[in-house]
Amino acid sequence: MPKVTYIEHNGTEHAVEVPVGLSVMRGAVDNNVPGIDADCGGECACATCHVFVDPAWEARTGTPSEQEASMLSFAATKQDNSRLSCQIEMTAALDGLVVRMPEAQH
Amino acid sequence: MEPATARVVIIGAGHAGSNAAAFLRQYGWPGEIILLGEEPVLPYHRPPLSKAWLKGEATAESLALRPAEFYGKQNVALRLGAPVEAIDRGAKSLRLAAGEVLAYDHLILATGARARRIPLPGADLPLVHTLRNAADADRLKAGIGPGRRVVVIGAGWIGLEVAASARALGAAATVLEAQDRVLARVASPALSAFVDAAHRRHGVDLRLRVGIEAIEPDAVRLADGTRIPADLVLLGVGAVAEDTLARAAGLAAPGGGIRVDGSARTADPAIHAIGDCTVRPLPGGAMGRLESVPSATEQARQAAADLCGRPVPAPEVCWFWSDQYELRIQVAGLAQGAALGVFRGDPAAGDRLAVFHLDAAGAVQAVEAVNAAPEFMAGKRLIALGRPVPPARLADPATPLAALATA
């Protein structure tokens, strides 16, 4: 099963297995990884599952949809590699993905 | 930090209760966690019940908040189908309906809300439904389909979402509302008008200012004598805090609900309360109820942080969302009592709406957005920033939102 490494703002790393087809957000929630709140449950309605995709993985995770981009546009800590993790679907090609969490989601 | 043997019992396994269990472990709670759910199913997302679940677009797996293995892995004793009968605050214990007595060091009440019933003749007939939980949703789902006649009493969020789902499923939908507009209690007139138009456009027979005389086995009879034929009736007239256990234990507010502070503490130092069952501090300093997933999650964080000896996080901007037809409705803050409403863009344009509500000092206190995610997100930031914004710039689509909502 592909692995994702989630890195908390304080540097703590969590390497977890995320089944293909689930979102990167769901992988964090299902393993109780701190730092991803996902208030809306994956509806792209809240921007509380914000992550920074490791630059080495940006090309493979693709670009945000218009809805996702507008939700991200006013996130307090937005960067060029910001994504909503509920919108990144796990695939075999993403095995080894590294994402970092912002200091806070609110 | 508590000794490793301290036991937290959480009553209620909805969003609030199950999130509290997860946050307690994230924050390092060393002791036992027992999560008691009344329903027989894994804790699940409630918002889809009136939407994706009703329309058959969700599965039990996607509805679950977390997979079954989660609880064991996190060392949370999840007990389903375990309703609680009474709390003994003096003995710090509770009794399950099955008779078992469980001691607690700390108790978290996350008992949620139940659908409000109204004393209407016929309200107990088999065609009448309410919607709070998965069992309600399954009964509702079985009764809605092509050609069925669904009558919704109450044009609040739940009623309107069910009407929209019924239309999507090919049923006829009538919505009956006593007030002069939809969402009268929770939205500004501008948002009400926008949502009203969408429902009529999608073929809903929406009737405002109507009184209801009675529900009959195959119809709803209005005060003026009109009979509206019905195969199914949904009563969507609000929810009341589920405070039965707390009330019997002397912990409920006179007007209903369980009063808590900004750390989710009740008047009993061994008991926190979170989610829809609480009367909580609101933006602006008043106390009230805030029935929403984000509020439940915020309070779950507060209770878990407080129990783990962590600083309780700063208050969040409250927000809410609803999906109806092609409308993605997002609201942040509370619009009630605002001094000025400012439209950004043309509200009559039809496909989107953004209204900022300013307080007397000129700061944004709420934003209502339909298919306008940038305005919603910018509004949420502006509410958090709390500084005055020139209304003319807010209204002018030529002023970039980023110029107003950053820094």
Image (tube, coloured by chain):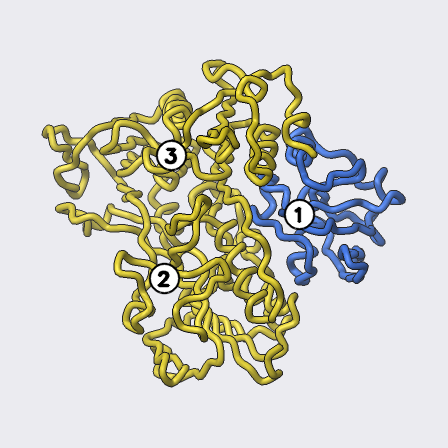
Tag 3 or tag 2, which sits nearer the N-term? 2
The residue nearer to you, when weighing B151 against B71, is B71
Amino acid beneath label 3: Gly
Q: Residues within 10 Å of mark 2 (few under 14, many from 20)?
A: many
Q: Chain A is shown in which shade? A: blue
Q: Say which quarter of the image contains residue A9.
A: bottom right
The residue nearer to you, when weighing B127 against B2, is B2
Q: Secondary structure at mark 1?
A: loop
Which chain is painted in yellow? Answer: B
Q: Are marks 1 and 3 in contact (CB under 8 Å)?
A: no
Q: Chain of mark 3?
A: B
The relative height of residue B68 versus residue B323 in the rendered view (above or below) is: below
Q: Tell me, yes or no, if residue A22 can be seen here.
A: no
Q: Residues within 10 Å of mark 3 (few under 14, many from 20)?
A: few
Amino acid beneath label 2: Ile
The residue nearer to you, when weighing B363 against B380, is B363
Q: Chain of mark 2?
A: B
The reply to the same-chain question for discs 1 and 3 is no
Residue underneath mark 2 = B258
Pair 2/3: label in front = 3
Q: Secondary structure at mark 2?
A: strand
Q: Say which quarter of the image contains residue B31.
A: bottom right
Q: Tell me, yes or no, if residue B11 can be seen here.
A: yes
Residue underneath mark 1 = A49
The reply to the same-chain question for discs 1 and 2 is no
Rounded to the nearest whole Å, what is the CA distance between mark 2 and mark 3?
25 Å
